[in-house]
Image: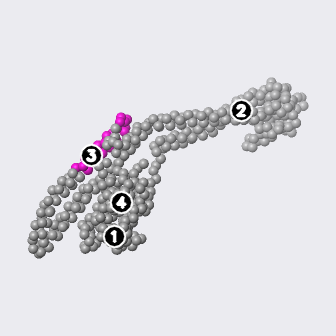
Amino acid sequence: MQIKAPQTPLPSLRSRLLIAAAVWLLGITLAAGYLMPSFIKTYLVDQEKHQLYIYLDELTAQIDTDSDGNVISPKPLSNPRFQQPYSGLYWSLNVADTELRSRSLWDTRISGDEESGFVGPDKQSLIVLTRDILLPDLDVPVTLTVAINQERLLKTLTQLTSGLWLILLIMAGGILCLIWLQVSWSLWPLRRLQKNLKQVREGETSELSGVYPAEIRPVVDDLNALLFHYQEILERARNHAGNLSHALKTPIAVLNNEVAHLNEQEQLRLQPSLQQLQQHIDYHLGRARMAGATNILSAKTAPSPRVDAISMAMDKVYANRGVVLVNELDSDLFVAIEKRDLDEIIGNLIENSYKWAKSLIRVHQLEQTNDTVVLAIEDDGPGIEDGAYQSALKRGVRLDETTPGTGLGLNIVNELAHSYRGELTLNRSQLGGLRASITLPKPRQ
């Protein structure tokens, strides 16, 4: 089995909703902040042009020529600003080489064009209207120009824009706060479901409880049904395994005793079958024992104390071999494995090392991630040939028939680790013997 690399978790639902709302509000705010000033400027300019058209009509009505065919300077217009130098309101009249100007222009003139913009006295930015008219006594048209300084308009627009941005930012912040409250209130049942799942995982309760919305209630009911069904199946499997063990123990013992009284030829003929029968029973009982924890979500065991306990037992069983086990695991390290299953995993691996080690067994941690930890059990024994690592994990395979055993230990460890989404790998140890690396899940925080 290959362990998939942990995937980077996606942002939470709250973060996704808030980010989407923030992006949407940012787009709306930017669009309003840039479009509305443009609309306001267009409106203000149109208002100024409307007033300029009135002045242009007034100026047109006063244009006339004298008896010599020269254009007569018009009378002062109704707005006194035309008489104040550099007042910001100007008019000019151009015909051939003749130019008449309002007193407000004084000694300057209106310059520029529509593309680059019109400029007046003191480099004032102007809004300009022009009109060409024909007089009966003239062969060329008369060009009338009326202009107004737009700096006051632009200043007003800047003030309006600043106020608009402030209003938009306050509005966007308020809407975002309301959305945050709405999202928090809407996701509150999911947070409560998360707390209930944590209680189940820690063994405080065996099912999910509480009142949930209609959209979540079916999920809660299905999870409760699944938890109950899992625990019931597991309990029945282990009960059947225990019953089968007691039911077969006595008949096999009787058969072994009867075979022991037969002649050597009959013993050689029957003992392999009895041994094979015993191997099958041990294998399937082992499979039943590793069916899973009674509460898989709350499984949490510290490997270091279990290694010490198993080592003390093995020191007594293999006292004549003089093997020393060095436990380098941290006492605060935990794995999400039930105690009995962890004993089955570590016990089989340590017992295998005690059988083959010359003098030293080392148990230590290779690496860990946020979700898994890799433990290594290695010895200084003869090890296994490089091409036989996978074969050693198969059921009933014994690489050395002279050593007692059923050939089921490594296979049980491999399948038990697999049931916890872990993995067992074998390779050469730096001590010279075998290194068994077991990947196990860490408890969820």
Task: Give the number of the disc on residue 178.
Answer: none
Distance between the Cα atoms at labels 1 and 2? Answer: 96 Å
Point 53% across, 35% down: residue = 177
> Where does label 4 land, which residue?
308
Between 184 and 412, the residue placed more toward the observer is 412
Magenta-colored stretch includes residue 96: no
SS for dot 4: helix
* Of the two numbered discs 4 and 1 in the rendering, the one whose residue sits closer to the viewer: 1
Mark found first going from the N terminus, 1 or 2: 2
Q: What residue range appears in magenta? A: 210-236
Above or below: residue 54 compared with residue 248: above
Q: Residues within 10 Å of mark 2 (few under 14, many from 20)?
A: few
Quarter of the rendering containing residue 132: top right
Distance between the Cα atoms at labels 3 and 1? Answer: 48 Å
Kind of residue at badge 3: His
Point 90% across, 31% down: residue = 68
Give how far across and how far down residue 335 sits, in percent. 38, 54
Give how far across and how far down residue 17 sits, in percent. 48, 41
> Where does label 1 land, which residue?
322
Between 220 and 97, the residue placed more toward the observer is 220
Left or right: 142, with 241 as reference point: right
Point 47% across, 41% down: residue = 14
Quarter of the rendering containing residue 139: top right
Q: Are marks 3 and 1 in contact (CB under 8 Å)?
A: no
Kind of residue at badge 1: Gly
Q: Residues within 10 Å of mark 1 (few under 14, many from 20)?
A: few
> Where does label 2 land, which residue?
156
Mark found first going from the N terminus, 4 or 3: 3
Task: Give the number of the disc on residue 229.
Answer: 3
Distance between the Cα atoms at labels 4 and 3? Answer: 35 Å
